[in-house]
Image (tube, grey):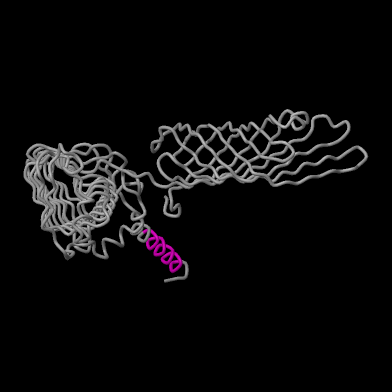
Amino acid sequence: MNLLNKKFFIIIFLIKLIFNFSYIFAETATYISGIIDKTENWVPKNSPYIISGEVVIEKKGIVRIYPGTVIKFKKDAQITVKGILYSVGGKDNPIRFLPEDGESFYEGIKFMSPYKNTIENSIFIRGAIKVEGSTVDISNNYILNATGIELFHFAKAIIKDNYFFNNTYGVYVDGKETQYSIIQNTFNKNRFAIYIKNSTLELITKNNFFNNTVNITNYGQKDINCKENFWGTIDEKYINGFIFDKKNNPKVGTVIFIPFAKEKFNLFEPPPAFVSLVKIYLSLKRPDEIPNRFGILVGPLFFLPFAPENLKKEADYGYGAEAEFNLSLSEIFVLGTEFKILNLQNKDKTNYDYKFDSTSLFLNLYTYFGYKPNVFFVPYAKIGNGILILSEQYKYSNQKTEKKNEINYSLLAGLGFEIFPLKFLAIRFEPAYNYTVRPDGNISLFIISAKCGIYFNSPFILNN
């Protein structure tokens, strides 16, 4: 083989090698939408399966999901099961039900089937598992940052050996002729571990409850039997404080929790293979919570002096810039640190040049009106206080200069609105009133500002 042929052979070999590696590492995706009316097998090599809109598994449809398969839902997407969904992962190789973008909530899986269905050994994040007029076996799953399991009319469910973490509901029940067993599950850090509005036949026993806002909520008229569960303590009064029933509302039934277990049950917990796959999701909030947001905003401002008189005589307006760092405390309250630089110069320079400079630092509290996630237009009010460093300088025609520096206490109040053209991008317009306490005459300013900023979900290093 001559030298030219050797070089040609090497080049072809390298091209094939690069192509093979790119094929291995490139993420392929299978897009699912519409109706499924035949047998389908969802396997890891075709993952992720991207669900958009409502996917309906019809009565003749059968979908088997194999261990290690990844199913990603677009926002508000749902799988409606009228046929059969058999989803069984491996103990160390779970099936993953995830939001496509890593954080949005989706409708999840809704069972409306006359057949028995199964969800086992899976990780379920951000969505809901809904059962209506169907029989479902839900076991050995890690359900976190989700809406939870919802049982409606004529639902029959076995909910066993699951770990519910940081969900709005662990299990929600509201329907006629509902029959369910909730056995050997762990409910940790959920808003409502078990919430019952209407049920027919239930078995709730041998579960562990830790750090939930409410462990059991009984909004139905019948008594609910919840004996032999472990509530994280053996203090009967303390246990009763995390149960909502007849003692809170005389129109509902009682939760019977005595006798209760005095030691924690040794139950299913997510194995290392599960936990390693969801570390980034552990920072996410429950669906009923708004993520804390961190914002950075900057922009120009103009101000009109109201007082004192000598400042009003020097000029009709001034200009400046401001920057702000803020953090949301809740859905409607935001705490911000604001830095302002103001400048004003006299309009009549016949006898002297006058400069008014101020640098201020404010701590502000914002209240948003009608705030909701992903809203486009948000009005707000704010109040703040801080310090203002003031510098006044007179430079006369004879070159004589007088300069005075002061540090004063300052107050700020304003109304404004934010526009969000993108989820993370904000444009803010704000009129505000600034009042500074000063020995030589208090300063009153009317300020108009416009700022542009970006927001991150906290901790922002985990935000996509």
The answer to which of 116 and 450 lies nearer the viewer is 450
Residue 364 as seen in the image, left or right of residue 46? right
Residue 84 in view in this figure: yes
Q: Is residue 301 magenta?
A: no
What residue range appears in magenta? Answer: 5-19
Residue 354 as seen in the image, left or right of residue 163? right
User: Residue 121's x, y, as percent?
Assistant: 19, 57
User: Residue 313's x, y, as percent?
Assistant: 77, 28
Q: Is residue 13 magenta?
A: yes
User: What is the number of callouts on the image?
Assistant: 0
Q: Quadrant of residue 184?
A: bottom left
The answer to which of 279 and 185 lies nearer the viewer is 185
User: Residue 398's x, y, as percent?
Assistant: 93, 39
The answer to which of 385 and 121 lies nearer the viewer is 385
Give the residue drawn at x 14%, y 57%: 229
Give the residue drawn at x 25%, y 40%: 107
User: Residue 61's x, y, as percent?
Assistant: 12, 42
Residue 273 as seen in the image, left or right of residue 377? left
Residue 60 in view in this figure: no
Residue 28 as seen in the image, left or right of residue 87? right
Q: Quadrant of the N terminus?
A: bottom left
In terms of secondary structure, what is the magenta stretch mainly? helix
Task: Classify 379 as above or below 156.
Answer: above
Give the residue drawn at x 12%, y 52%: 226
The answer to which of 129 and 368 lies nearer the viewer is 368
